[in-house]
Amino acid sequence: MKYHTPSTFEDASALAASAPGVTRFLAGGTDVLVQLRAEIVTPDDLIDIKHIPGVKEIARTKDGGWRIGVAVSGAELGAHAELVSEWPGVVEGMELVGSTQVQGRATLVGNLCNGSPAADSVPGLVAAGATVTITGPGGTRELAVEEVPAGPGKTSLAKGEVISAVHLPPRGDNAGDAYLRFIPRTEMDIAVVGAAVSLRLDGDTVTEARVALGAVAPTVVLVSDAAAALIGSSLDDAALDALAAAATAACNPIDDKRGTVEFRTEVAGVLVKRAARIAYARAKGEK
Amino acid sequence: MPKDELKSEYKLVGTRPDRPDGLDKVTGRARYGADFSMPGMLFAAVVRSPHAHAKILKIDASKALALEGVKAVVTRADFPDGLTGEDWNLQENTIANDTALYDGHAVAAVAATSALLARDAAKLIEVEYQVLPHVTDVDEAFAPGAPAVRPGSADHSVSSREVDLPDNVRHNVVREIEFGHGDVEAGFAEADLVREGTYKTEATHQGYIEPHACVGQMGADGRGEMWVCTQGQWFIRKFCAAVLGIEASGLRVTASEIGGGFGGKTTIFMEPLALALSRKAGGRPVKLVMTRSEVLRATGPTASASMDVKIGMKKDGTLTAARAVFRMQGGAFPGSPVDLALTCAFASYKLPNVEHIGYDILANRPKCAAYRAPGAPMGAFAVESLIDEMARELGLDPLDVRLKNAVAEGDKSSYGPTYNRIGLVEVLEATKAHPNLSVPLGPNQGRGVATGFWFNHGGETSVSVSVTEDGTATVSIGTPDIGGLRASIALMVAETFGIGYDDVRVNVVETGALGFNEPSHGSRATFASGKAAVTSAQSCIKQMCQRAADKWGIDAEAVEWVDGAAQPAGPNAGKFPPMTMKEIAETMGATGGPISGHNETTMDGVGASFGTHVVDVEVDPETGRTTILRYLVVQDAGKAVHPSYVEGQYQGGAVQGIGWALNEEYVYGKDGRLQNPIFLDYRVPVASDLPMIDTVIVEVPNPGHPYGVRGVGETGITPPLPAVANAIADAVGVRMKHLPMNPPKVLAAIKAKANG
């Protein structure tokens, strides 16, 4: 195995593009190193991107959004008061990843690129309308987060492409987001179902909404029917029932040791309603 | 009542000093299994079957042996033939002969100069398999026509029920059990309410944090040493000697500190492989450390069970008759704890008519090992669930029903013997008086109670106590310290001598230092090693009185031992100032030589322990998720030598039971492979899942122990399974009869009930 520490994303991309065997980018390492030790994936080239300047930064962008470096850990995200106050759903999703120790290492981009449909930070990013910058052999491009996962353990990134930043849009007024996951225990588990809702209000009425589900399909899914069920409503029971029905209809889960098809589908409808209530309360300024 | 309010006649027994091994453990100085290293040591890796059941056609290790640094490969061919009975079972489980019997069954092992090299070499050992039909579920293994796990091993000789069991069909039944008393049919006829139910529990693992680890060294002469994480170094010696065909005295075994065992470390799994590799590698020491996945796939979880229970009850709650038919699989070998499950099943109740029937069944799973009160939690799940259901149906308080039928001294037990002094009634009364019982419950919340029992065990015991030359005491015990044993032994020995707690040093010693000791199992260590240590200390005291008598020129009978010193036993004995243990010790070389006492016996006087648990839960009706709100353990300790460690045992038993009840299970795929061999998916409870577990120590002294000790380690896991099930039934009205009661199962039950 060869271990690389490039100092630019262009170099990282070039290394990956020319590597003949199994390649992995190393950020927090909470998936890559675990898979390596468990002999699930033994990379021929391990490209550590933590030495690239700026990867640990959380910065306000000109449009009022956020640029988050690829090596920013969950703990650092959670300690950033402004970010937490604007995007609590995004941050709480990331903070559910792993233990306290893992939180000191694990990153948004790592969680995204691991390609798990159950990744806890991804539904919140998708609901937020987050995008990523991808550096590749042909330059850089922007991609919506929901376009990154391509199936369990797979992403849409081409050979030699590496994510070089995460962008959150400006939060604006009267808006809130939330993420909930279902696990049988209280910690140290993988989501059996995850649900994220981001919405904006005009008075009591929802004017914008995005809803994303995790662990109920081969990838995290953006459910536009579920968003449509919310828009124009004041989160009354009928809207919540329509939201749950749309979420349930979007489920295409598997039966496995962590949960059954029936259970995942049912609980997706339950969680999405609960997440919507929290997001709504946050948009109203309730803590 | 809080322990502090109890009047104690003792100075030390019943107090809570720091444990003597605590500083080493919190500073990292304590040496656990994987901490041993030796010069020239090799590292081993094991090749394991990926199939649940497969004929081994060929093993080719030539590519592995060609690697530089690979020093030895062993297969079954390196072990002796001709073993029988349990010795053969242990050997076969250590390394497969011509058939792999479960996913994870060891097939070959390799030793190399580094752990990484050994792992790489193991991958180069080529094994050709012919996959055979397999069965993992207990009911499927019991069914007529099931694939035979070990053809020809069926045994129906004990049964008088050939009608039910023509031996040409149930291939996997290797033992049948029947016992009871009275006339159960007449008893059911007497009852106002007769109910029956079928209950199922899945296999669970002890889940100890420390994986199995050892360093083994053995020469061509068959003599060697082993350093190993175990609950019983003499069992390691005995079993390894049998499997390797060497003399037991040729092997010296030292137990490391132990990061949990719960019964699972009372036997061998991979230890003979390290010794066989060492012998083949010219006597170089070989270290073998299991991964978590190996621990879950290839050590000894408990059995899975399928159980029918039928009970007759009068309107006032009096039990008239009961019948239990239990089926248990304990892996591909005989030895599921179905016998113990049956004997514990009705042990809490006065029953004039009772019948027990049991079947020990083979399946393509790892060989089960002991797990905390083996069998008792499963039996309790079935029996205590049904009693709860019947009490509710008759409108009776579940605790009152238990009190009405509770056994006491002089009652004939359901399994035969007559009880001596036991504390079940005291436990139930203390439970009724506890404030948790009057906490109001909200919507979707429920309260469940259940009672449990464990015999406790005496066992083969050797202990030595020596008076140290400075007047302190050194105690050698052969039972590893799995739950505060050194502290408890030091308290009892110090109390006996009349010296300070810190003046007693307790060492867990190797097999060369004492006679045979059974492991720290059966909740016996504080009871049996403690009793033997007190007997040994009393022998030392007798010798010290003799030394004082010799010095004073009086009869030894005229000397008594008070507060750590010899003194004349009254005014007629003569006037001499007391002679302290320190004074006697400092001159003992000149007064007759070293003073020590020892005790070797199969310990008698064991006292059973009963416990009652009360749990409050809240069930989320939309997700089926159960939250434990409150949990109370009330149990008879006989005497709590160190109350903190007794409370720790109560809490630990409850927590393991909660895990078993709610989420833990061995999940096998259709291919017979274990689907969840990591702690991510084998879901033991995490700290944040639990409230502080409340405890009440009831003390009904055991007349068979000098300080009244009963065992406390195991009873605590016997009530939680039904207690949680009864609480869920109380909360949302669904009766869960198949563990674990995980959210998908509970939600499905809630929806089924809502849909009528």
Image: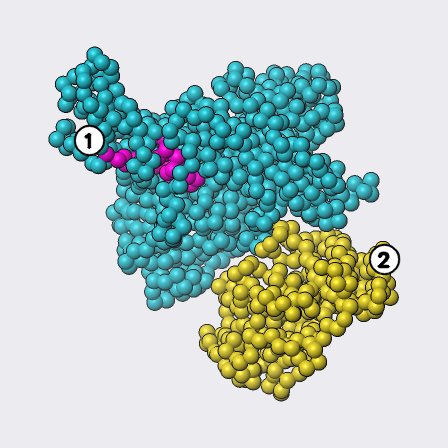
The quarter in which the C terminus of chain B is drawn is: top right
Residue B491 visible from this viewpoint: yes
- Pick out the residue farthest to the top: B572
Label 1 marks a residue whose chain is B
Could you tell me which secondary element the residue under label 1 belongs to? helix
Q: Quadrant of residue B83?
A: top left
Q: Is residue B67 shown above or below A187?
A: below
**Residue A236's disc number:** 2
Left or right: A97, with B267 as reference point? right
Residue B593 percent across, percent down from the top left: 16, 31
Q: Position of residue A54 (x, y in %)?
A: 56, 79
For mark 2, name the chain: A
Q: CA distance from mark 2 to mark 1?
A: 86 Å
The percent coordinates of residue B628 (x first, y second) are 64, 43
> Along the line of sight, which residue is nearer the eye, B376 or B393?
B393
Residue B517 falls in which quadrant of the image? top left
Q: Is B418 or A22 nearer to us in this picture?
A: B418
Residue at figure coordinates x 69%, y 43% from the top left: B618
Q: Which residue is mark 1?
A: B583
Question: Helix or strand or loop: what does disc 2 sit on?
Answer: loop
Residue type marked 2: Asp
**Dot 2 crowding, Cα within 10 Å, few <14, some 14–19, many 20+:** few
B242 drawn magenta: no
| Left or right, residue B382 beside residue B268 | right
Q: Which colour represents chain A?
A: yellow
The color chain B is rendered in? cyan
- Residue B472 inside the magenta-drawn segment: yes
Stretch of the chain drawn in magenta: B471-492
Residue occupying the far bottom of the picture: A138
Instruction: Please tell me which residue is depicted at 50% across the width and 69% down the height of the picture.
Output: A42
